């Protein structure tokens, strides 16, 4: 006898909620996890039928840029292991950490797209997160201090919407005549369909090099072009940039292997019987150059699908239309509207040495989400962030331990920091992981924050920012360590000399 299926209603019916999270990609799931662990009433709605966000489809060649190392010197259920696992969402409970290693087939330390998607599904199952799927956010209106999110299921009313919709809308240039003859990265065909074809790729960022790498054995020649040179050295120092395995097109270009990398502006595309003529102008010589090719792919990136939020007052910037945000990931022009996930790359931080944060990748923005949720929890729900007291004589060791092993500091160099402060009564408190830019730019109790940074020479070292009389008035760099271990007598002496009059 067949078992009768029991129909279940989806969670989060339309109505009023303290917070409404929009999206079920990594950013939305991580934010919902943090909200749940703080006991904050919230709903999660998603246009997708299941967890995963863009990982349900991308990257095109089905292999991630970021690695998860199954074997490391730390157990999988520890926070320290997160430094070696760029792809799992993070959790407070040891049993919910490091989901990815057990799902990988061992063929590569770079998970497949399908393995990453499975990891997000498993995180939802383990942590008990709930999402109302197949419920797309379609528009927004204001109702006093609340915003109303419109969906096919009904209206969701909240004081605090948290948008995690990604940078997911394919963006095509609108100022290039003939651009309709190019396909966007999102519309790239099967690799074998490019066999023997002449291919022109517009762009020299991650997606352009991904396509060039994946199509090396098929297309010939491959031309990559954009007006500005790609800063390979900066990209390689940033773990959110071009991964080492995407450098093969550069090698082919240097060796004359059928790849050509041009610094050129694309002026127009003309289709004719023999293919497509791409008219460019070299930015190094100002000379015109015409490439005769069979296919053109615009690896010109994606924009942020904010729907009608700009009309309501959310200011944006840049080609991707990212919302302008505070260091707490709140709209600067529409207070109460927050963002998480890849959108958090709109908060640039200090950008020391010109190296960007890793907020566009899971291993970076999974920590940013907690800062956004902590701000929401404190301001709207009275949940102040814990500030446990610590013994003053443990301050140096505590900060050096973070510099040596704290995954948030290593994944978000010069962006996140571990801060300690001294209250007026002389007690020392642990502020936890904070935004470094926020710490530097705003007044607060005296203390110090340590971060990890990579300089323009590729040197990795801790940096210390000391706050006196309410303001950061000094910063210093500690010595390098070949094995990035800073809990040494020499480093203790250095840090003690910096903190002696502040944390004692």
Image: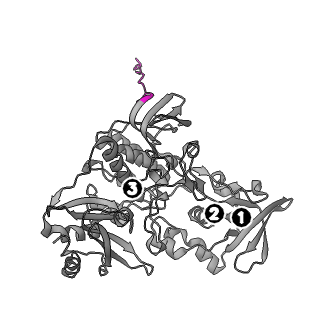
Quarter-of-image position of residue 249: bottom right
Q: Which residue is mark 3?
A: 368
Q: Give the magenta range.
A: 1-15
- Between 35 and 184, the residue placed more toward the observer is 35
Q: Residues within 10 Å of mark 2 (few under 14, many from 20)?
A: many
Give me the residue at 76% from left, 53% from top: 180
Query: Mark 1 and mark 3: span between their CA atoms?
Result: 38 Å
Q: Is residue 450 visible?
A: no
Numbered tag placed on residue 215 in the rendering: 2
Q: Residues within 10 Å of mark 1 (few under 14, many from 20)?
A: many
Q: Residue furthest right?
A: 273
Disc 1 or 3, which lies upstream in sequence? 1
Left or right: where 273 falls relative to 25:
right
The quarter of the image holding the C terminus is bottom left
Per the picture, the main secondary structure of the magenta-coloured stretch is: loop
The secondary element bearing badge 1 is classed as strand
């Amino acid at each position: 006898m067949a078992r009768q299926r029991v129909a279940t209603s989806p969670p989060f019916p339309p109505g009023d909620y303290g917070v409404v999270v929009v999206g079920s990609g990594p950013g939305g799931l991580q934010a919902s996890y943090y909200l749940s662990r703080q006991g904050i009433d919230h709903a999660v709605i998603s246009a997708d039928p299941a967890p995963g966000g863009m990982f349900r489809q991308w990257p095109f060649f089905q292999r991630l840029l970021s690695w998860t190392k199954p074997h490391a010197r730390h157990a999988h259920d520890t926070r320290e292991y997160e430094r070696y696992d760029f792809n799992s969402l993070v959790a407070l409970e040891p049993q919910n950490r490091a989901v990815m290693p057990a799902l990988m087939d061992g063929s590569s330390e770079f998970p497949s797209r399908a393995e990453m998607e499975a990891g997000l599904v498993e995180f939802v199952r383990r942590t008990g997160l709930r999402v109302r799927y197949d419920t797309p956010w379609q528009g927004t209106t204001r109702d006093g201090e609340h915003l109303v999110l419109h969906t096919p299921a009904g209206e969701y009313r909240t004081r605090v919407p948290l948008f995690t919709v990604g940078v997911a809308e394919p963006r095509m240039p609108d100022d290039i005549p003939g651009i309709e003859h190019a396909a966007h990265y999102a519309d790239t065909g099967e690799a074998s369909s490019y066999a023997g074809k002449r291919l022109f790729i517009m762009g020299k960022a991650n997606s352009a090099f991904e396509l060039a790498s994946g199509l090396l054995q098929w297309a010939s020649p491959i031309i990559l072009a954009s007006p500005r040179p790609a800063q390979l050295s900066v990209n390689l120092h940033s773990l959110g940039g071009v991964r080492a395995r995407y450098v093969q097109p550069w090698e082919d270009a240097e060796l004359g292997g059928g790849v050509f990398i041009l610094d050129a502006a694309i002026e127009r595309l003309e289709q004719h019987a023999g293919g497509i003529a791409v008219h460019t102008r070299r930015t190094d010589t100002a000379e015109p150059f015409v490439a005769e090719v069979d296919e053109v792919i615009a690896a010109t990136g994606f924009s942020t699908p904010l729907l009608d939020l700009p009309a309501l007052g959310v200011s944006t910037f840049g080609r991707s239309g990212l919302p302008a945000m505070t260091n707490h990931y709140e709209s600067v022009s529409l207070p109460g509207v927050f963002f998480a996930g890849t959108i958090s790359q709109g908060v640039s931080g200090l950008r020391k040495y010109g190296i960007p944060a890793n907020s566009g990748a899971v291993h970076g923005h999974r920590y940013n989400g907690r800062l956004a949720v902590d701000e929401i929890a404190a301001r709207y729900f009275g949940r102040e962030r814990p500030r446990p007291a610590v013994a003053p004589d443990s301050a140096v060791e505590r900060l050096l331990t973070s510099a040596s092993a704290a995954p948030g500091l290593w994944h978000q160099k010069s962006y996140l920091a571990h801060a300690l402060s001294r209250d007026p009564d002389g007690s020392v408190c642990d502020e936890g992981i904070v935004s470094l830019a926020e710490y530097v730019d705003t007044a607060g109790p005296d203390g110090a924050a340590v971060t990890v940074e990579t300089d323009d020479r590729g040197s990795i070292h801790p940096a210390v920012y000391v706050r006196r009389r309410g303001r950061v008035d000094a910063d210093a760099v500690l010595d390098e360590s070949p094995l990035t271990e800073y809990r040494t007598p020499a480093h203790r002496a250095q840090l003690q000399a910096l903190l002696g009059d502040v944390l004692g």
